[in-house]
Amino acid sequence: MTLSRAFLLFGSDEREPTVQRLQAGQLSVDLDGGNLRTIRFAEREVLRGISFLVRDRDWGTCEAALDGVQIEVGAERATVRYSARFAAPDGAILRCNATIALDPQSVTFAANFTPDRDFETARAGFVVLHPVVGVAGRPVAVEHGDGTIERAVFPDFIEPWQPFKSISAITHEAMPGVTAECRMTGDVFEMEDQRNWTDGSYKTYVRPLALPWPYILKAGETLRQSILLTITPSAPPVAADGRTPEAIEISLADISQTLPEIGLGLRPEDLTEELRHADLVAELGARHLICHFDPGAGHGVEALSGFRRIAQASGAKVTLECFLACRQALDEELKAVAADVETAGLTLSSIAVSPSVDRQSTPPGSTWPDCPPLEAVYAAAQRAFPGLPLGGGMFSYFTELNRKRVPAGSLSYLTHCTNPIVHAADDLSVMQTFEALRHVTRSVRAIYGDRPYRIGPSTIAMRQNPYGSATKDNPLGRRIAMANRDPRHNALFGVAWTLAYAATVAEAGLEVLTLSTLCGPFGLIAAAGEPMEDGGKRPLFHVLKWLAELAGRAGVSVETSASDALVGVGAATDSGRTVLLANISPQMRVAALGFVGKARITIVDENWMRSRTDEPKAVDLRGESVRLPAYAVARIEIPR
């Protein structure tokens, strides 16, 4: 079977919505499915987006069905009008009439919306995204609902709670000599630091989280909201060079950190397949098995025995990721876990524990659920597993660790995960999460210092949903926020995302980094019948193997002149240096390798995908540059 290029890149033939650039003078916007993104002035990003969004009761996105789209474009202005239809899971319909107007110094986005019957939603209205790059830590003026103006800065380290509330307008310097005022009307707005979820933005959204949710939009009642962005130059702006450079400069520098060991997640629900493919753990070079264990979900000796068999076959160390129901005395619950571990004959290298209630998020303004003090949980774990290294933190995301900061004094290491599709699942947003991920590790270090630190399992698909009752099923393999499987995990996009993740956290000094499970929708092995690999290794196996080979070695920083296109990580080896590069963009990129003399290069790209060979092959690198197609990755071995 011949696979399409889209399938090789994304694991799906689904096409993303067509983006149309609208321009008025030096102000431009990208119209994307009825919303605006990448709003630029003089070719510099001012806002990341303005969107009208509707969330269902579990914070899933109700997709907009657009109708009657009218676009009028003149020499110095553009106007867009359309109707949109949003369907709730129970069949209720919200109809919205929207108008977008663009002129050389302003953008207006207005919406009137009416439900046909009572409509249950966690949020319905406008969301404004300010970028992080060039904005974090910079001054901002916030006009509140009472007319007062607060002069502050966009948070540098990630704020656990809303940095600004009751917002009428936000004004910041978009570039030297140019201010941008964003004014919101129609409801109460507040801001959250969306870097908590690795979104590359600060998000200003409608309706305070302290108010009850989900809530009801009354049948037949029309609501109105609008956003007005005004650009005011006090001096002629210096336009950014919007051209894509022919070559992206790459430079190397030694860093003080060693690269982390690579882990693999194991899940009891995938145990049959995991046992069949246990030999892949050693082939990959993974040194840690992160074993999910939840007695409340019925996990017991059988699951632990399966973990033991995989550990014995691979020689990998075992960490038990253990949830506690906390419904009985803590000592009783943990002694029961310890007894099951002993019965299964499983040898642990460490255990991480977390109360089950902490898998769900507690949003601002909500009542924290009943939970024993974490000091008591950790002390009971140490009594049940004396002398065993103890991990703590959150098995969900940095958001929860930032909001419920754990008493780390008794812990051997901290842990959390991340997920790139909490709020948006389009290709650009997923790759922009790396702008925020580096702030996540910075913030963890600012809070917890140099304590040993582990991340994962973190994958594109969502392992669990801390913000609703369930993750979203995705049987058609689409790009869906909060989905429990994602087609890009199977394709080149997932390969590039995995390598870029490792590159982004390289200087955080992690002990263990886990970016895949062994099997299942988050795993190394394609499900039987998947056309991409026909039940064999997914392409990301190879990049994880490269990373495992560099584990424990002195890191090499890879700086690029276009970090939104090419990222990389390297390490010193016995014979020289090895550099790994990822193209995280949909265009061909050229990397200028001025530091390379004689070298060998291995590329995983769409040509390799089409050849379906087992292992990508190294060849001599000719010249001082390399062409990397969309979402390709490369391994460059540089001898001394």
Image (cartoon, rainbow, N blue to C red):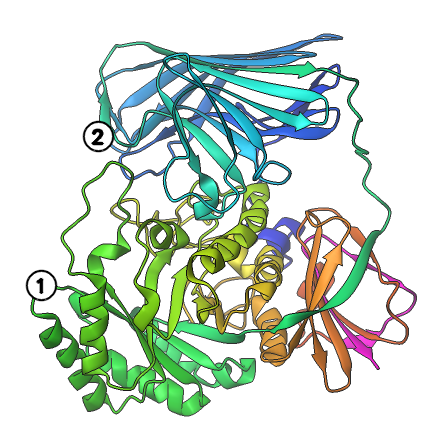
* Count of numbered marks: 2
* Residue at figure coordinates x 33%, y 24% from the top left: 207
Image quarter for residue 366?
top left
From the top left corner, tell me how far across and down residue 222 is, in percent.
31, 9
From the top left corner, tell me how far across and down residue 592 is, in percent.
85, 58
Q: CA distance from mark 1 to mark 2?
A: 27 Å
Which residue in the protein does label 2 denote?
212
Residue 612 appears in the picture as rendered: yes
* Residue at figure coordinates x 78%, y 32% from the top left: 240
**Nearest to N terminus: mark 1 or mark 2:** 2
Q: Is residue 277 left or right of residue 257?
A: left
Q: In the image, is residue 407 above or below residue 24?
A: below
Q: Is residue 228 left or right of residue 168?
A: right
Magenta part, dominant SS:
strand
Residues in magenta?
618-640
Which residue in the protein does label 1 denote?
327
From the top left corner, tell me how far across and down residue 307 is, in percent.
33, 82
From the top left corner, tell me how far across and down residue 36 is, in percent.
56, 25
Q: In the image, is residue 132 above or below residue 338?
A: above
Q: Nearer the viewer, residue 445 or 186?
A: 445
The quarter of the rendered structure image containing the C terminus is bottom right
**Circle 2 SS class:** loop
Q: Amino acid at mark 1?
A: Arg
* Residue at figure coordinates x 26%, y 10% from the top left: 221
The disc label shown at residue 414, or none: none
Given the current orientation, which residue lies at the most extreme left position?
A: 328
Q: In the image, is residue 515 above or below residue 177?
A: below
Q: Amino acid at mark 2?
A: Pro
The quarter of the rendered structure image containing the N terminus is bottom right
**Circle 1 SS class:** loop
